[in-house]
Amino acid sequence: MKITILVDNCAALPSSLGSRLIAEWGFSTYLHEPRILYDTGLTGIALINNMRALEMDPDDPDYLVLSHGHVDHTGGVIKLMDMRTRPLTVVAHEEAFSRNTGFTIDDLRRRNVRVIAIREPYTVAGNVIASGGIPRRWGPSHLGGVADEVPDDMALYIKTGSGLVVVTGCGHSGPENIVEYGLQLTGAGKLRAIMGGLHFMGLGRARMDEAAGYLASRNPEMVAAMHCTGIEGQAVLMGMLGGRFRVGGVGSTFEFDV
């Protein structure tokens, strides 16, 4: 399985310059097989530019999964839809559409979109599951502190032969909740990798250390924390995880055997 970062706050790779990739505040990533786009960034400008620069087409995805309803993850939806020539299935939490996403369900349906609004886990395709609402049973959630109510926050869980791969948009549910729920839901024996936003921004250092320590205790092969993790949060994770920490950024690719 190949995963490519299409939108992130940073264009962190030297190759981004040659490919003319651009960054913006937000997040989007693409699973090449099955063909699932996860989030669309803030405006759609970076998404479409970077897809084309990386020789992808707006028509490539069969599915779009929205991590939650915040505009830095949904802002490119309409631009993407208006550039497509074939139908698309959108999977999102029911409550995502109550936020200021910049569009309504009717806007999507007028653009030949099949909308699947969920609360419970949903198998998108193959071995990829959209989490649905993530219970807060194992630790605090994240948003400028440790009291975050974003019930529409959803992760992608990918079960591989070597463990669970988790993709998050902002990680509002908190890493303990996201990972433990994924392990419980999939029956995976271990955490193999987690990538995406973890929303360490706004947290105190003690909570950053606690969350990073939890991830380290799960002994993943890789943690690629981007977007709202923030520079300080990335530094804490790098210090805790050493060589298992990966710098993400626009154009980064990650490959896993399944």
Image (tube, rainbow, N blue to C red):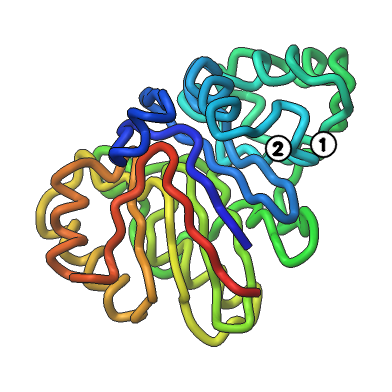
| Left or right, residue 71 beside residue 232 | right
- Figure quadrant of the C terminus: bottom right
Is 130 situated left or right of 5 in this image? right
In the image shown, does 50 or 95 lie closer to the viewer? 50
- The answer to whether 54 appears left or right of 111 in the picture is left
On the rendered image, what quadrant is the N terminus found in?
bottom right
- Where on the picture, by quarter, is residue 84? top right
Q: Earlier in the sequence, mark 2 or mark 1?
A: 2
Residue 34, located in which quarter of the rendered image?
bottom right
The residue lying at 35 percent from left, 38 percent from top is: 15
Farthest bottom residue in view: 189
Which amino acid, mark 2? Leu
Residue 225, given in percent of the width and then of the height, sits at: 33, 52
Q: How many marks?
A: 2
Residue type at mark 1?
A: Thr
Determine whether 17 is above or below 172 in the image.
Answer: above
- Residue 67 vs 114, above or below: the answer is below
Residue at 71% x, 58% y is 121
Q: Which residue is mark 1?
A: 89
State the residue in front, 143 or 1: 1
Spatial CA distance of label 2 from label 1 is 6 Å
Secondary structure beneath label 1:
strand
Residue 131 against residue 6 in the figure, above or below: below
Where in the figure is residue 207, as x and y percent of width and height? 18, 58
The residue beneath circle 2 is 64
Secondary element under disc 2, as helix, strand or loop, is: strand
Q: Crowding near pointer 1: few (<14 within 10 Å), some, many (20+)? A: some
Name, please, the residue furthest toward the front: 18
Q: Where does residue 209 sit, x and y in percent of width and height?
A: 15, 63
Residue at 62% x, 65% y is 158
